[in-house]
Amino acid sequence: MEFNNLREQLTAECAFPARFSPGNLLKTAAILFVSLFLFLLLFQPFGVYVPEDKYNYFIICGAHALLPSLIVSIYFTALNYFRKKYPSKWTKSDEYLHIAVILLLVGIGSFLIRDLIYNNPDNWSVLYLWAEIRNCYLAGILFYFFITFAGFYFRSKKAESIAGRPFAAITEANDAVRSAPEIFIKTQVKQDDFSFIADNFLFARAEGNYIELTQYKNDSITTELKRITLKQFESQLAAHSFLFRCHRAYLINLTRIEKVSGNSQGYLLSFNSAADKVPVSRAQLTSFNNRYKQFFSVYSN
């Protein structure tokens, strides 16, 4: 049973790591360089034999720290390009596989630059190739989990600051939503086309090839079944920034949220008088928090 749970976690679709996205990649590479440089300089983890050094140890630390930073930048720049061109789902096993490949490349790269920075007749030996790859995996896995847990800690703090807060500032955006025209939705069958008022819309839940459309109008909650998939429904609402896909099965109206509860593992959203609570998946927490901050900053001024 535990093995099945682990396999499900590794193969379940999740969000692509924000630290490796195009907008954050340069910052990630810079943090990696500084962290590795200080780690090598202060702790000298793999021993230093000064007579072999062609340069000052400070320069050698810079070379060993720069190499993985460049490899990570180039590797994920290429990966982001291909993911954009050929979209596919992302899982934790994908992340672990790519990290393993990067550590192998760093190990090989560290071996190839040995002759540039060390005076050693055995620089090109298989023994040193194995040593560089082994050291990269030992240090790389340590750094990977350190960065992962650090990121988890800061996300948790951020989540705690948001969860439980009333969305008073966001609800002030209702005036902007009310000014939006009636939204018309086309389905595959013309007679099933429908429209709704943005201000009335609370959330939509996927139900196979249908959606359950939940609205608050005339002082009551109504739920209607519409013949359209959630993906098709969402694609027609891209122009409306107050609508957000918070979960693979839910699309919500941000301005109608009354309360957020939960933690860094996921949120539960409350809407007006609706009894049902809508989940925010762990994969969508960062996007949800960013969208919340955007609305908060715009409509609290």
Image (cartoon, helix red, strand yellow):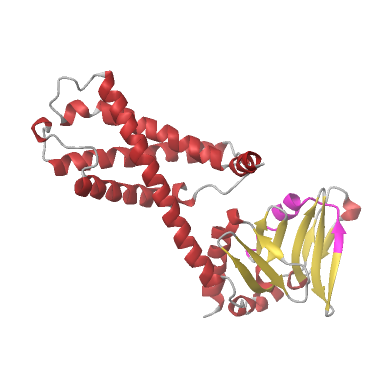
Residue at 68% x, 61% y: name it: 279
Q: Which residues are magenta?
A: 224-241
On screen, 42 above or below 139?
below
Q: Is residue 23 visible?
A: no
Residue projecting furthest to the right:
191
Quadrant position of the N terminus in the picture? top right
Residue at 18% x, 25% y: name it: 115
Q: Position of residue 162 (x, y in %)?
A: 55, 71
Horizontally, residue 128 falls left or right of residue 220, namely: left
Q: Position of residue 223 (x, y in %)?
A: 85, 65
Q: Position of residue 21 (x, y in %)?
A: 47, 48
**Residue 56's quadrant in the figure?**
top left
Camera-nearest residue between 200 and 91:
91
Residue 201 among those drawn in magenta? no
Camera-nearest residue between 93 and 31:
93
Horizontally, residue 261 falls left or right of residue 274, namely: left
On screen, 139 above or below 101?
below
Q: Is residue 46 visible?
A: yes
Horizontally, residue 258 falls left or right of residue 29, namely: right
Residue at 54% x, 79% y: name it: 300
Residue at 12% x, 26% y: name it: 119
